[in-house]
Amino acid sequence: MPKLIRRRFKDTRGEAELFRRRAIAGFLLILLGLCALVSRYVFLQVQHHDEFALRSVNNSVKPRAIPPARGLIYDRNGVLLADNIPAFRLEVRPDQVQNMSELLAQLGTVVPLDQDDLDAFRKQLKQSRRFDSVPLKMRLTEDDIARFAVNRWRFPGVDVVPYLTRYYPLGPLFGHVVGYVSRIDADDMANLDPDRYKGTTHIGRTGLERSYEDMLHGTPGYELDEVNADGRIQQVLETHPPIPGKNLYLSIDARVQKAAQDAFEGRPGSAVAIDPRNGQVLAMVSVPTYDPNLFVNGISTADYKSLITAPDKPLINRALRGAYPPGSTVKPFLGLAGLEYGLRTPQDTVFSSGVFYIPGQSRGYRDDQRYGAGTVNLYKAIYASVNTYFYKLALDMGIDRISEFMGSYGFGRPSGVDLPGEVSGILPSREWKAKHSPKQPGWYPGETVITGIGQGYWLVTTMQLAHALATFADRGLPYAPRVVMSAADVSKAPSPLPNPPTGPSLIKNMKDWDAVNEGMQDVIYSNDPLSTGYRIKLGEGFPYRIAGKSGTAERFSRTSDAYNENRNSAYLAARHRAWFEAFTPAENPRIAVAVVLEAGVWGADDAGPIARKILDAWLATQGGAVPPNKPLSESGIASAPASGASASLPADAMPEDTPQGDMPAPDSSSAGDDSQ
């Protein structure tokens, strides 16, 4: 039976209904998509228009910090001491470099890169953000710039950038005073305000550059730059200029500063000159010195090694950090203390036989003269530097009153000068010894005796002594020493920085001041052969009266040959610190000077002429005529040679009855041993 073929008829109505349903669903989906698209458009273009517009601009506009120009530094007469000069450096953008090692190798064939440059770059690279530019080579020469310009296409992410770099026109003359700036490192950034130091590459490291960093630095600005896809600037859209740092004007006179440095003739030591009327520092030198320009953009390894290995340590600021026994320079202060405490009058006398004995003890303490100075009052005790007078005075006064009085003049603590790094020195006292000598905390009479002549535990800086002398010279009115006299914004007149007295006058009776002042004038002008200044005539030809005092502090304890005049000057210089302090005009002081030579034969003979040259230079700045300095050969003064030199004193330079400077007591470093 044949198969029946079923034929399915087309359901036209059903298909139409299906199509209609599908068309409606498709339309609804399209409508929903359009609604979502419109909603997203409204969200982006209406509700968040400002935000996304800013994001769009930020893709092509980049802010760039503009570092402020660092304030300049001048001396009191407008001589420029710290300048900003234009220079160019090579910078690298790490985010635009794929292979840094390869880039540095290829770049080194175009622009010379030494190992110091590479080491500094790698160190900063680790400390910086990837999109920050990192300096690779500072101070490019014109040849460096020309060679790089020709090959610039080879080095994406590398560019030559102009900047202002610090320069010190007088170099070593103000190295220890002005100091220097150097590159900012990671340790600096951890302690700095990142907003204030944006774009800044250098910071004050030593001297005034460090202590006045806040004034000198200024406030950074910024500019908005339109950049291309490679990050290169196409145009500057907006600029907000930085505020430069303040200019500083020092109280130091460059002429006096140079005269002071030249007077040392290369011998290690330091000098400080202060105006007693206001505490302004007129000169401050430390010899030897160094060139601060070496440090600005990174000192080379060779240069740094030569500085730190130099036997005379040029990097040490001896005026602030060199602490030495003061020797007889403290005798005027001790004499004043005896008057102030009522223990002595200027006319009270003691007998100097050449050796002083503590009552009840057999140990002797030698005087300055072999056979003594005879009957001595205050005036003679100062000008002849008679140890016996001050041995007995110190013993009568006691260490507690000595410490109290000397402390009031600033000994044993920083002077407060506006420079960093000042040390405190040592003012002998019971408390100090108990703290630093726990095995022998007791205080002995022998230690008091040698304290009276500036030996024993004493340590004083040149700045401390100059500050104490200036306080005395101004009749006891203390001022903190100040190197910066005034400051000024750019294009404005300088404004003085206030420096009021730090307290009332320390002197109770001005007659006491007159007596000590007279004794110090006798050091310069007395015709007594016992005077420590008798042979050198420091006041000769100077129009104002000078008051002064020498000091010769031993570096080692003395032996039985203490009065042997056959020792040559090299031997003596190796054993002595030579001091001299002076102020003028004696009746109304305007300058006080303290000088120390690390190796000098006698205080008056060696440090005295340096002080006189400083006073001569100061006199010239006041409009006075400077008398010609007599050659040393004419005056019969034997100058201390450089360390290690061999020279002998003239046969007539130190006759037997002539005082030998300000020679301290025997075995001064342990004088208390037999006094226990």
Image: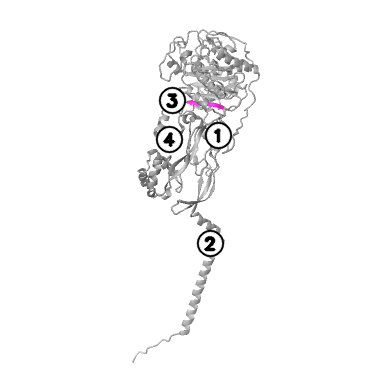
Residue type beneath disc 2:
Leu
Residue 243 visible in the snapshot:
yes
The amino acid pointed to by label 1 is Leu
Q: In front: 469, or 76?
A: 76
- Is there a contact, CB below 8 Å, between mark 3 and mark 1? no
Label 1 sits on residue = 248
| Foreground label between 3 and 4 | 4
Residue 397 position in % (x across, y down): 60, 16
Contact (Cβ within 8 Å) of mark 1 with mark 2: no
Q: Nearer the viewer, mark 2 or mark 4?
A: 4
Magenta stretch bounds: 281-287
Rounded to the nearest angstrom, the CA distance separating label 2 from label 4 is: 55 Å
Q: Mark 3 or 4 closer to N-term? A: 4
Query: Mark 2 or mark 4: which comes first in sequence?
Result: 2
**Closer to the N terminus: mark 2 or mark 3?**
2
Point out the tag, 1 or 2, that comes first from the N-terminus: 2
The CA span between labels 4 and 1 is: 26 Å
Task: Provide the residue designation for mark 2.
Answer: 44
Q: Determine which residue is flagged by label 4.
A: 299
Residue farthest toward the right in the current orientation of the protein: 509
Check residue 105 for magenta coloring.
Answer: no
Q: Main secondary structure of the magenta part?
A: strand
- C-alpha span from label 1 to label 2: 55 Å
Q: CA distance from mark 3 to mark 4?
A: 20 Å
Say which amino acid is labelled 3. Asp
Q: Nearer the viewer, mark 1 or mark 2?
A: 1
Q: Which residue is mark 3?
A: 312
